[in-house]
Image: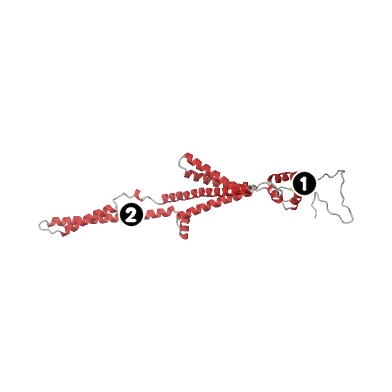
């Protein structure tokens, strides 16, 4: 089987996919927004907030682009880049988790404020249950003393005192009951407010796992952050991947039947000696035409086991050879 002279081999180069770039840019922009908000909430003064924001933005961008930028680098650079990428991912996820946890708290406070009325604003403040019970104990003691007294001459006055102390004791009992009811209402309001402070899904998940709500909030924040960072890194790696270019195969003369010599055209020129570099270029052109290697610097380097500079030179010579073929 022969190939026509000048026929392209491999997949033609195409423009970067707009969808991949749009998704990668959207993921990076979202992560930067999270880092900006988290850094702004962390800092106290304005310079502190600006420094936190700058640190978060740099770490997010480095975490997204380091895998794609270090792809064609030597192994030592890749090793250092991998360690730095892990550190950038950890710090970026920590910043995103800070935003998610604070956002959950703010949402819970807004729900509690909008749905639970403040009881102390409508009910006038009274005495505490301790003060009421102290007065009740004092009146009970006085009533007990009055009941033990014997009247010799002023019996009506003693009876009036006993009745007054009994009425005062009843009033104190009623006041104590009112205070207890008010405390019960306050307790129910506090319980309802605490329930509204917690996200419904988070609360049920914490009950299912048998752990606290704060741990589930932290775990969910880290999960969201890790997924966002991982998606952004993958999209940028795909977007910045070297594209395959079109390679034209050299002219191949089909073999002829036995007994006949191949037909060649003589132009009156003498074949010049072929240099080793030209031999490597021709062999590389044949390998590219066969589909065993792509015409990129990284693939040429892996295929021939040469240095980055030599692979770049061979790629340039291959392009010139393809253009003149």
Q: Position of residue 36 (x, y in %)?
A: 51, 44
Q: Nearer the viewer, residue 40 or 188?
A: 40
Q: Position of residue 55 (x, y in %)?
A: 53, 43
Circles 1 and 2, Cβ within 8 Å, touching? The answer is no
What sort of colour scheme is used for the picture?
secondary structure
Q: Quadrant of residue 145?
A: bottom left
Q: Residue at x 48, y 41 (%)?
A: 48
Q: Nearer the viewer, residue 248 or 52?
A: 52
Please indicate whether residue 272 sits to the left or right of residue 52 in the image.
right
Q: Quadrant of residue 138?
A: bottom left
Q: Which label is found at residue 66?
A: none
Callout 1: SS:
helix
Q: Is residue 166 visible?
A: no
Q: How many numbered discs sit on the rendered protein?
A: 2
Residue at the farthest right position: 259
Q: Nearer the viewer, residue 293 or 10?
A: 293
Please indicate whether residue 320 sits to the left or right of residue 261 in the image.
left
Q: Position of residue 122 (x, y in %)?
A: 34, 49
Q: Position of residue 85 (x, y in %)?
A: 57, 48
Tag 1 residue: 276
Tag 2 residue: 183
Please indicate whether residue 56 sits to the left or right of residue 133 in the image.
right
Q: Residue at x 32, y 56 (%)?
A: 181
Q: Nearer the viewer, residue 74 or 108?
A: 74
Q: Which comes sooner in the sequence, label 1 or label 2? A: 2
Please indicate whether residue 252 sits to the left or right of residue 294 in the image.
right
Residue at the farthest top position: 47
Q: In 3D space, how far apart are the residues under numbered discs 1 and 2 (Cα atoms)?
A: 96 Å
Image quarter of the N terminus: bottom right
Image quarter of the C terminus: top right
Callout 2: SS:
helix
């Amino acid at each position: 089987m022969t190939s026509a002279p000048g026929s392209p081999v491999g997949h033609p180069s195409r423009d970067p996919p707009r969808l991949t770039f749009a998704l990668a840019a959207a993921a990076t922009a979202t992560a930067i927004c999270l880092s900006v908000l988290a850094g702004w909430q962390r800092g106290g003064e304005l310079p502190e907030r600006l420094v936190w924001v700058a640190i978060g933005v740099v770490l997010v961008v480095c975490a997204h682009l380091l895998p794609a930028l270090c792809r064609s680098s030597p192994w030592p650079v890749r090793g250092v880049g991998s360690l730095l990428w892990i550190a950038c991912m950890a710090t970026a996820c920590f910043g995103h988790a800070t935003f998610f946890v604070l956002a959950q708290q703010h949402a819970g406070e807004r729900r509690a404020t909008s749905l639970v009325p403040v009881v102390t604003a409508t009910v006038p403040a009274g005495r505490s249950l301790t003060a009421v019970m102290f007065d009740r104990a004092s009146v009970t003691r006085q009533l007990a003393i009055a009941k033990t007294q014997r009247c010799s001459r002023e019996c009506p006055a003693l009876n009036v005192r006993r009745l007054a102390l009994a009425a005062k004791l009843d009033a104190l009992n009623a006041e104590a009951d009112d205070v207890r009811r008010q405390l019960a209402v306050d307790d129910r309001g506090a319980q309802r407010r605490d329930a509204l402070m917690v996200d419904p899904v988070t609360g049920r998940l914490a009950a299912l796992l048998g752990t606290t709500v704060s741990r589930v909030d932290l775990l969910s924040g880290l999960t969201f952050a890790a997924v966002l960072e991982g998606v952004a890194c993958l999209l940028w790696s795909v977007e910045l991947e070297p594209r395959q270019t079109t390679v034209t195969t050299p002219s191949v003369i089909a073999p002829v039947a036995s007994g006949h010599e191949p037909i060649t055209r003589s132009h009156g020129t003498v074949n010049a000696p072929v240099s080793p570099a030209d031999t490597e270029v021709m062999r590389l052109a044949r390998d590219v035409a066969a589909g065993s290697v792509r015409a990129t610097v990284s693939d040429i380097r892996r295929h021939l086991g040469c240095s980055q500079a030599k692979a770049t030179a061979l790629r340039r010579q291959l392009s010139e050879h393809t253009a003149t073929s």
